[in-house]
Image (cartoon, rainbow, N blue to C red):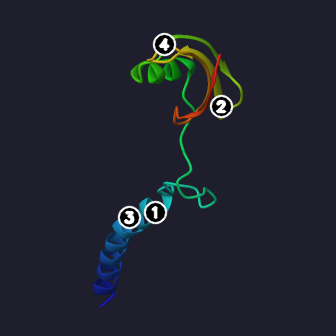
Amino acid sequence: MRKTMIRTAAALSLLALPMGGIALAQSAAPATTPATAPAGAPTGPAMGMTQIVDHLSAQGYKDIREVERKSDKLFEVKATTPQGQRQELLLDARTGEILKAERD
């Protein structure tokens, strides 16, 4: 009888071990988006200056100069539009979206 109880306890502990590991793995997974982030808000790291220049070049901008980080969320850039007009641009640092464009 004692051997049967020991075997049963050992078998149960072996079954519980993998289940505990699965529970730990599930609880350790990070959330994909913070609960405080508004819907549609850009997430992720800000682009670097080189990425901003590449992003504008892909849109047809030329003579991109004076790339200046205004904050962790904004870049100010002077560039020539595909139509040849000089502009001062304000860009979102995370998405590269042009938020404001003024003639330079």
- As drawn, the residue found furthest toward the bottom would be 1
User: Going from the N terminus, do you reach mark 1 or mark 2 first?
Assistant: 1
Towards the viewer: 32 or 50: 50
Residue picked out by circle 3: 22
Q: Callout 4, which amino acid? A: Gly
- Whichever of callouts 1 and 4 sits on the residue coming sooner in the sequence is 1
| Quarter of the figure that contains the C terminus | top right
Q: Nearer the viewer, mark 4 or mark 2?
A: 4
Q: Amino acid at mark 2?
A: Leu
Q: Badges 4 and 2: C-beta atoms under 8 Å apart?
A: no
Q: Which residue is mark 2?
A: 74
Sequence-wise, which precedes: disc 4 or disc 2?
2
- C-alpha separation, residue under disc 4 versus residue under disc 3: 60 Å
Q: Is residue 89 above or below residue 16?
A: above
Marks 1 and 2 sit apart, C-alpha to C-alpha, by: 40 Å
Q: Are marks 1 and 4 in contact (CB under 8 Å)?
A: no
> Which is in the foreground here, disc 1 or disc 4?
4
Alpha carbon of mark 3 to alpha carbon of mark 1: how far?
Answer: 5 Å
Query: Who's the residue at 53% across and 35% down the image?
Result: 97
**Residue behind mark 4:** 84
Kindly report the distance in space between the C-alpha atoms of the residues bearing marks 4 and 2.
Answer: 24 Å
Dot 4, how many residues are within 10 Å of its Cα: few (below 14), some (14-19), or many (20+)? few
* Mark nearer the N terminus (2 vs 3): 3
Q: Is residue 78 above or below residue 93?
A: above
Q: Nearer the viewer, mark 1 or mark 2?
A: 2
| Residue 46 vs residue 79, the one in the foreground | 79
User: What residue does disc 1 label?
Assistant: 24
Tell me the CA gap for discs 1 and 4.
58 Å
Q: Identity of the amino acid at label 1?
A: Leu
Which amino acid type is shown beneath numbered disc 3? Ile
Labelled pair 3, 1 in contact (Cβ < 8 Å): yes
